Amino acid sequence: MSLGRKGRLASVGTLLVLAMMGVWRAKIDPSRMSLLVTAVIGAVTSIYALFTYEILLQNQEMAKAAVDSTKVMERSLRFSHAPNLIYQTINTKDPTFQAKEGLIRPIDNDDYKRARTEFTGGEQKEFVFALVQNKGQGAATNLTIEASYNITDSSNPNRNTSVVKEASAQILEPGCAVALCIFISKVPTADDRVALVSARLRTSDFYRDAIDEPALEINVDVGKHHVESDPNCVVRLF
């Protein structure tokens, strides 16, 4: 019980005791006895009302504490299930990611099948992927990737092209990544380049799925997105 609440109850109790002592010592005319009874009833009613009011205040505080506790638990539970997706563009000479097997899972579409075929044909070729890493506490579910790139390929008669790539992954576990093949450079040179135009991720998690919340949409900041190239790769990324 708060100090203010104790003070209110003590003040009213003291006044009532003093009033009762005054009535006990005073000589009251019998004709005014009914008035005294009414006053006593009013005092008792006031005490009852005060106690009722204090009980209501206490219930409100308990209800607020319960709501706050529920919010904290909900945030903790949501955080434990929340993914944290990082988008980047990488350039590698090994599209199978054998050095990071189990951590990077290539999306097995037609582009990736073509990349695997080209990979067996020589070590000169380079492969550009869009990589989505999950660095959060929980798994990402129903992940979709939409990415647009401008590509300059000096070995292609159509030197400048634009491509739009789309893919999906049902589940992306924490600490893992999916790789979407963007470009295969058969004869890489320093004049070749791959520049991100736009990228958007759409994802959910197990907690959101359980409470039927809509999926999150993440628009990648092109100016801040990370690029990374393996040693000896010459195709430039932007």
Image: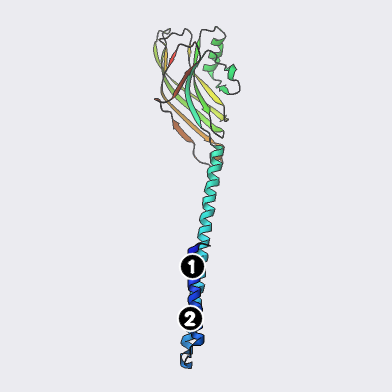
Q: Residue 7 in the image: x percent, y percent?
A: 48, 67
Image point (53%, 61%), residue name: 59
Element under label 1?
A: helix
Disc 2 residue crowd, few under 14, some 14–19, many 20+, Cα 10 Å: few
Q: Quadrant of the C terminus?
A: top left
For residue 173, above or below residue 90? below
Q: Amino acid at mark 1?
A: Gly
Scheme of colours in the image: rainbow
Q: Nearer the viewer, residue 222 or 47?
A: 47
* Residue of label 1: 7
Say which of 117 and 34 sits in front: 34
Q: CA distance from mark 1 to mark 2?
A: 18 Å
Q: Is residue 7 above or below residue 229?
A: below
Question: Residue at (53%, 46%) from the top-left corner?
Answer: 72
Residue displayed at 48% across by 79% down: 42
Tell which of 175 and 15 is nearer to you: 15
Please say if 40 is above or below 54.
below
Tell me where residue 157 appears, x and y as whole percent: 40, 7
| Image quarter of residue 152 | top left
Residue 195: horizontal and vertical position, in percent?
41, 19
Q: Which residue is mark 2?
A: 19
Q: Earlier in the sequence, mark 1 or mark 2?
A: 1
From the viewer's perspective, is residue 177 above or below residue 124? below
| Label placed on residue 115 | none
Q: Residue 173 location, x and y as percent? A: 58, 30
Q: Quick check: marks 1 and 2 in contact, CB under 8 Å?
A: no
* Amino acid, disc 2: Ala
Q: Residues within 10 Å of mark 1 (few under 14, many from 20)?
A: few
